[in-house]
């Protein structure tokens, strides 16, 4: 955004061009992330984005493509994003029944309607913020001289896009991390996707606005606003933690015959035994009638006619 801006005399002549180029790099990496998401999702048979983050993202692109964008380059960027998002929507609707089979069959079977409703609500929210922000000149932080939109001065679409995209970024980063924790497998994501997403956000939200703030601070003081620091900082923290958790998850997951990813059987057994042990020590073990708890103790067994001894594992609880 902000392609029509006119920088003040004290700012370098290349400032608007450089910030536009930085934004273009961010868009390029996010486009690549979307392509990799669709490819990985089809391979793993698991959708790649949390549905809340996807709905906010798609609704943001719809509102800005139809209402805020004023140049052909801006409209082209939002159109490409929307076309790629259609692929992510397809994988989400297609594989939701598998991903939600053990938690909520209703959500999995009705994902198209749920996601469609969430996108409509997201469009309502984004449009409400956009119309309020652009309802009068000078709205936002600092002096908006040199900020142009639809031939009128004083309307800063750069700050407008920063706040709305920042919320979408924070929700997407936090929900992606939460989804990885809950799933305990990396279906629909990869190191390449994470890296492209990270670089895209770094340039789109960080470098682009950082350049403008450094050379044109009177119009871009919003970038150092405490709320801005919170949004960008927490998003960055979530992305870094996501990479670390992804590394740990990929070490424990297993590939099923159909290509899906799942937590390994060994890990499931360990989690089950740990949960049972905690319940035993708490004195409130409740075992369903259909399942029998067996205690295996360390002892020596005779393996064959030569009476070769071997030791059983350490004491543990498991279900039969």
Image (cartoon, rainbow, N blue to C red):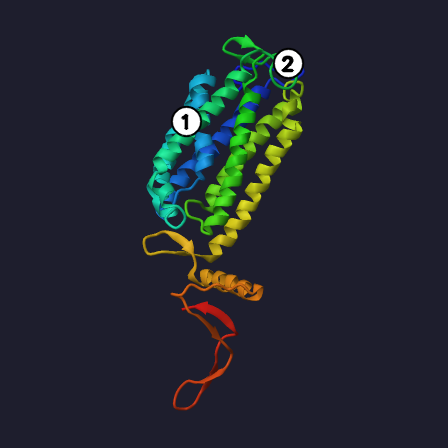
State the image coordinates of residue 12 (x, y, percent, origin top left): 63, 19
Q: Residue at x 66, y 17 (%)?
A: 142
Q: Residue at x 36, y 32 (%)?
A: 86
Q: Quadrant of residue 236?
A: top right
Toward the viewer: 35 or 67? 67
Q: Quadrant of residue 214?
A: top right
State the image coordinates of residue 93 (x, y, percent, origin top left): 35, 39
Q: Residue at x 45, y 51 (%)?
A: 185
Q: Which residue is mark 2?
A: 8
Q: Which residue is mark 1?
A: 120
Toward the viewer: 146 or 25? 146
In the shown orientation, is residue 254 left or right of residue 147?
A: left
Residue density around tag 2, few if under 14, some if 14–19, many if 20 or more, within 10 Å: few
Label 2 or label 1, whichever lies nearer to me, is 1
Indicate the secondary structure of the residue bearing disc 2: loop
State the image coordinates of residue 206 (x, y, percent, origin top left): 59, 31
Question: In the image, is residue 301 above or below residue 169?
Answer: below
Q: Residue at x 53, y 23 (%)?
A: 161
């Amino acid at each position: 955004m902000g392609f029509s801006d006119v920088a003040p005399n004290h700012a370098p002549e290349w400032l608007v061009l450089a910030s536009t180029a930085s934004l273009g790099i961010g868009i390029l990496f996010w486009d690549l992330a979307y392509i990799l998401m669709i490819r990985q999702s089809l391979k793993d048979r698991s959708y790649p984005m949390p549905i809340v983050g996807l709905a906010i993202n798609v609704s943001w692109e719809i509102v800005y493509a139809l209402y805020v964008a004023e140049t052909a380059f801006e409209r082209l960027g939002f159109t490409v994003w929307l076309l790629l998002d259609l692929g992510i929507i397809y994988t989400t609707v297609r594989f939701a029944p598998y991903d939600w089979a053990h938690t909520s069959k209703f959500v999995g079977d009705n994902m198209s309607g749920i996601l469609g409703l969430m996108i409509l609500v997201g469009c309502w929210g984004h449009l409400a913020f956009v119309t309020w922000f652009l309802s009068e000149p000078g709205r936002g932080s600092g002096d908006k001289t040199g900020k142009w939109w639809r031939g009128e001065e004083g309307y800063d679409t750069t700050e407008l896009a920063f706040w709305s995209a920042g919320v979408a970024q924070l929700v997407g980063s936090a929900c992606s991390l939460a989804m990885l924790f809950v799933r305990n497998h990396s279906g629909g994501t990869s190191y390449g996707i994470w890296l492209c997403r990270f670089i895209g956000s770094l340039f789109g939200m960080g470098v682009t606005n950082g350049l403008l703030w450094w050379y044109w601070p009177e119009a871009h003081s919003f970038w150092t606003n405490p709320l801005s620091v919170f949004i960008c900082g927490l998003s960055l923290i979530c992305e870094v933690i996501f990479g670390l958790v992804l590394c740990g998850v990929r070490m424990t997951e297993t590939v099923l015959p159909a290509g899906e990813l799942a937590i390994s059987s060994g890990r499931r057994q360990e989690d089950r035994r740990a949960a049972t042990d905690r319940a035993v020590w708490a004195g409130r073990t409740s075992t369903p009638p259909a399942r029998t708890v067996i205690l295996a103790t360390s002892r020596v067994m005779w393996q064959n006619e030569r009476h070769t001894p071997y030791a059983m594992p350490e004491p543990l609880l498991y279900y039969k």
